[in-house]
Amino acid sequence: MHLIFVTSLVPDGDPTTGYEIANAAIIAALRRSGARVTVLGYTWPGKTPSDPDNTISLGEVDVRTEGAGALQKMRWLAGAVLSGLTFASAKLRAASEADIRAALKQAEPYDAYVLNAAQFAGAFEGLFTDRPSIFVAHNVEHRSAEENALAVGDIVQRTLFRREARLVRAVEERLCARAAFVYTLAEEDRAALGVPGDHRSAALPLVTRASAARPGRAREIVCDAALIGTWTWQPNRIGLEWYLREVTPWLPRNFRTRIAGSIPGDLACPPGVEFVGRVADAVGFVRGAAVVPLIARAGTGVQLKTIEAFEQGLACVATSRSLRGIAHLPSNCRVADDPATFAAELAAMAADRVGDVDGRAFHAAQLQVLDERIARGLGAIGAAAASGAAAA
């Protein structure tokens, strides 16, 4: 079976965001199942596809809102309003419909689409209805937009997030209704999207690496806690603000937290916290901490940082929201949602230097179930493709 994996950004061999890590895991699983996968989407500026023989690039695009100038943001907003699209989808209209039709023609013959997330599929929705599809819902986007609206104080931003929520809900409903099968990244997202039955959907347990980390590797502890992420993304920012404003006041004065990644300029850095910016080795950065705080407070889908920590076997303290899509908790993970309790657990684990556990069992279990559920979806889309061929 030949699948067109329709996505906003094609893999470039250097996945840095949770979205890119998830994409790599899903594409690898589809190929392990025996499917031929051609990826269609944009590349980051200055990047090249990691698998050019099986990739069709629509050109370079940078859709990061935080790095865009005021004029570019206004263009995106005007495009969204005039077209009736979400802001996220309007940013992906760099290519024309004719460009995409030509790219799909180049990929023929193919059997079905894998529509990866609502943003790109929503930008060109009418182009992917001629064949059966699988919809991959990385998040319940309308829920995330609703939470974002509640979290911001600015009336303009709140209005825009509410518009986004209303429009993307309709897009998600249509994509789910048309799909032969729906993949989510967290079990609870299936019901939230209206596809709870096993014949219609499956939650994919992900991995962040092809093979598990070897246990027993020595670690040099350089700080008590370390966090890394794209903190300009609103659901991530909500968690970071909670940590900085509500957790850190309860931590001991000598407790040291290092935070890497893109951090909004208006966030204050409290005592005991260091913002270090971008780091070259994300895994090495996190492994330099005595304990890893997993601080999700908003959003849907799965938390890739949680999976990374569990694969590494690292000691961690997690909010309940950070454990979406996780069925098994390692023995060195503690759960807390109250800020004072979260801080107390962090301080105790850092002081006790709670050791690593073997993450290979977690990785193997995730991989086994991932492949089983990918096969279920491919069976559904194969049946839909056969039915369509017979009807023709």
Image (tube, helix red, strand yellow):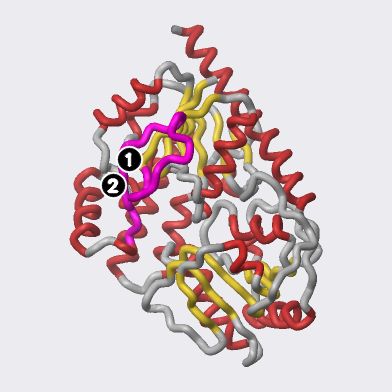
Left or right, 8 with respect to 179, comes to: left
Residue placed most toward the observer, 181 or 271: 271
Left or right, 307 with respect to 381, comes to: right
Q: Which mark is residue 278?
A: none
Q: Which residue is under mark 1?
A: 123
In magenta, the rendered stretch is: 43-65
Q: Which residue is under mark 2?
A: 90
Residue 48 visible in this rendered orientation of the protein: yes
178 above or below 311?
above
Residue 292: image x %, image y %?
A: 65, 70
What residue is shown at x 50% (from left), y 55% (from top)? Answer: 16
Magenta stretch holds residue 112 = no
17 above or below 224?
above
Residue 199 visible in this rendered orientation of the protein: no
Identify the mark nearer the N-term, 2 or 1.
Answer: 2
What residue is shown at x 78% (from left), y 60% (from top)? Answer: 330
Contact, CB < 8 Å: mark 2 with mark 1?
A: yes
What amino acid does circle 2 point to? Ala
